[in-house]
Amino acid sequence: MSASAATTSSGDARARARFHAAAASAAVAGLFTLFVCGFLAAAHVRTRTLEFHESEELAALRAAMLKAPDAASAAHLKETIRRRDLRLREDYFAREGFTRTGGYLLLGGAAVFVIALAQAASCRRRLPMPRPDPEAAERAARSRRLARVAVASLALAIGGAGILAGVLWTGEPAGAAKPAPGEPAQAGGGAPPAAAGDFPTPEEIAKQWPRFRGPGGLGISAYTDVPDAWNGPTGEGILWKAPVPLPGENSPVVWGDRVFVTGATEKNREVYCFDAATGRMLWQKPVETPEGSAAEPPEILEDTGYAAPTAATDGRRVAAIFANGDVACFDFAGRRLWARNLGPIKNSYGYSSSLNMHLGRVLVLLDQGTPAKPASRLLAIDAATGKTAWETARPVAASWATPALVRAAERDQLVTAGNPWVIAYDPAGGAELWRAKLLDGDVAPSPTFGAGLVFAANTGTKLAAIRPGGRGDVTESAVAWSAEDGLPDIVSPLTDGKLVWLFTTDGLVTCYRVKDGSKAYEKELEVVEKGKDGKEKKVGVVVKSSPALVGDRFYVVDEKGLTHILAAGEEFKVLAILPLGEAVRASPAFLARRIYMRGEKHLYAVGKK
Amino acid sequence: MNRHATAAAVLAILAALLAGAAPAVERFALPQFKSGYVRPATEVPAPRADLYDWLDVSALAAALAAASYLAIRARSRRGLWWLAVMSLAYFGFWRGGCACAVGATQNVALALGGGGYAVPAAVALFFILPLAATLFFGRTFCAGVCPLGALQELVVVRPLRVPAWLEHSLGLLAYIYLGAAVLFAATGSAFVICEYDPFVSIFRLAPLGRPASTMNALGGSTGMLVLGAAFLAAGLFIGRPYCRWLCPYGAILRLLGRVSRWRVTITPEECIKCRLCEDACPFGAIRRPTGDWPRGERLIERRRLAVLLVIAAALLAAGAGLGWRLVGPMSRMHHTVRQADRVRLEETGQVEGTVDLSDAFYATHRPPAELYAEAAAVEASFARASPLFGAWVGLVLGAKLIQLSVRRTRTDYEPDRAACVSCGRCFAYCPIERERWKKASGGTNAS
């Protein structure tokens, strides 16, 4: 063997060894990269499917907490939620750290793989060895022909795809908004209602109790000759008592000789019409939408039930709404005019905002969502046809309050209370008049109005007296005064124009002077009960019904059905405590010589025969 | 070793300079406390200082100068390779692919679209500097500055030859993509180049110098990561697939590269037609000498050219017509138009319930009429721009057909002015170059 041959042979051996080493390194690095890739993919899928804020377990725990029977269970569940939430967050960040480390390993592995592969390939690289190519020119010509065919094919493919897209495209220009067949004007429109003129005058309304808390939603009786003595258990002063078939937290509304209430369970919804003179049920109508009501019952709190919103009437028709979003309208003979479903209403605790009727339209407040993601809106539905007259999106979270309909600053105003905005709208066209950022949390007390001021309050924030004459955001300019004691959580405030009273569910009554917001008193409602030892003692009460002003006194009904009549003055003075004999959470309706009260299972008319 | 040490030192200095620019973002919805707990105010770090933008621009200018010097003057493939490594590290992994000339095309298009957008000076320079460099030195930006090109350059292991006819048609996709990117950017609809950048999710696998909360590893779309990996896997055997067939900025550079003042050549002196370089380019950018044309064939080619000119004009017109017909579907790329569509369906009762898109609008408590008016304005801008885009596609296809029918005479092996990315791979295949190296190193091989 010559020296040069020996050198070549030794060089080949080195090249082979280098190739094998590089190939083996590439194989190991490739496997490692695949391995890391698999782990990362699995972790990635897990991260995507186990986002802690989407945890079904947490959602179930939250739902269970809302329905917890007592405070101790709720507190226990709350602690469980916190622990679970913390663990999910820790898991999330651990996975994120794992992914980050994996990213570095993946890149490192891939880099080694590519370098080793390049080394192996360089060992096998062949040196260029051009040979004579007599067909080069012909091959080049063929290649150009093929290229022209390929480009033409591409043009055909692009053109074909474009034509297909053009043919399949059936959309309309987004800028050309057309209302659906039969639908009147959209948001902001002030088109006249279908039954123009077929609605009551303000004077007619003032004599009735057509909605939650009476005319305007202010809780003020137009009559002073209202009963001030009765005894439900003995029947003294009780005109009649009629059973209501289905349960409901809504309050009676009255127009002339008709009293309306509604009731619902998870599956059934009904509207009832009673004869105001005798208590005889004149009609009982189920509510179902033509297309079928929502299949899934809404999530509600047991205390709220499926029929918390109070119906509204304009003396021609009565409209009712339920927790599943079913809304329906009947004439006084019980004929259904229309029914729609506005649900599902995403509102924890259950939907409870009551209806208003104005100028032949039903005003529906659908507050849903969270402060970060509000999904709230205000609708006006033509009472005669059921078509949406206008609709306005609202920048507030879910709320449970009912708007007040007042005449202030020489214009009609629909005043709503939500989190965080108190907003007034033009009830005819839905245009926003003013707004003030004042409230927070779960807003349930409805706003009220007196002495030229709107009063809105909610627990945890404040009672604000707002001048309703402005435009736009009046947060800084229109608040006359505010106070922070005795803030209500469910019960709506009451005012006679000189004083404003707040009521908490645990019976605390706080009275402020309207002129300057100074506090007149803060007292608890109490009743005397006999203890187990037979001794009498004072105990507190629970109030969920909203109070009403009757002349120089006001009526507050507690959950046990005891009506506390208090003097409407700067001194706390209980004039009478009168039993009904049945639990009451609805707000009574006050008319001439009559009070209509809804107990847990019965409708009562209090008065003299 | 000295060059390695220098590269490491440069990277270390850049790392020290850029550490700490960290935007902060709330990751979780904040809890609401009713217990009286007062949440401390969120402290927001200062935004990234302008200084760093100018540092990026300086880095780009320096890298362009270095690439041009290494490709044209020094003819150093190894130098270009190291420059690609450094560019990949800085513009790719360090800056997360966001100091990017390719994407800057869209900023410029948006500004030219008349929507009131002003291009930041640094972004404008990112767009202009590589174009200017290409006018003078050819596509040296692609050789070792662009991180997308660098990443693909480094993974080419065993490139296969793509048939020339396929190369011609696939290369057109980049021009079409450029037209679409300009259309959607100019109308304010989308930055599709950024949204479909296949490599950005790979750059962000290593969140160097960035808070994980904003540039999370695997934080982008899984689909894009898989697409990037697929491009890289293909890139082992097909040289720079994204650069050759999709890169919209590369399409502009190709046009400018045709008229560049200087450019990379295979041989430093006169070509001896040894044919050693004819298969050297993994990107199919080396053109062979053409030889003489037979007279009869010339006549046929001229007639064909005349027909193709007519076809090109027809393609241009057809493209414009098709673009006009597709105003509707194309305008749906714009958020406002999609939102108006959805709100209209909800407002007219054609659909039940709301979605995030419509909820976002309702939260603004603006009347739908305003949204519809805005959508109509967007559609009007599409009505003007879509036919132009269609005409551009027709022009690209027609021009390619014409180019394929026009013969140019070449006497030497030379890089295609448009397709050559100045990577310098072909230098080592030229025996004259090797001879030059020998002389330069006193008789031993060097690169």
Image (tube, rainbow, N blue to C red):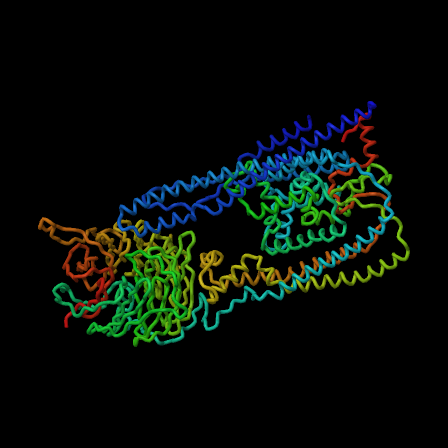
Corner quadrant of residue A13? top right
The residue at 12%/50% (across/down) is A531
B226 or A538: nearer the viewer: B226
Q: Is residue A253 above or below residue B12?
A: below
**Coordinates of residue A426 in the picture (x, y in percent):** 39, 65
B381 or A260: nearer the viewer: A260
Q: Is residue B134 among the parts visible in the rendering?
A: no
The residue at 58%/39% (across/down) is A34
Q: Quadrant of the C terminus of chain B?
A: top right
Of all residues, the one furthest to the top in this rendering is: A3
Q: Quadrant of the N terminus of chain B?
A: top right
**Coordinates of residue A317 in the picture (x, y in percent):** 32, 73
The residue at 85%/52% (across/down) is A138
Of all residues, the one furthest to the right in this rendering is: B295
Corner quadrant of residue B159? top right
Corner quadrant of residue A392? bottom left
Tally the numbered discs: 0
**Coordinates of residue B120 in the picture (x, y in percent):** 60, 46
B343 or B409: nearer the viewer: B409
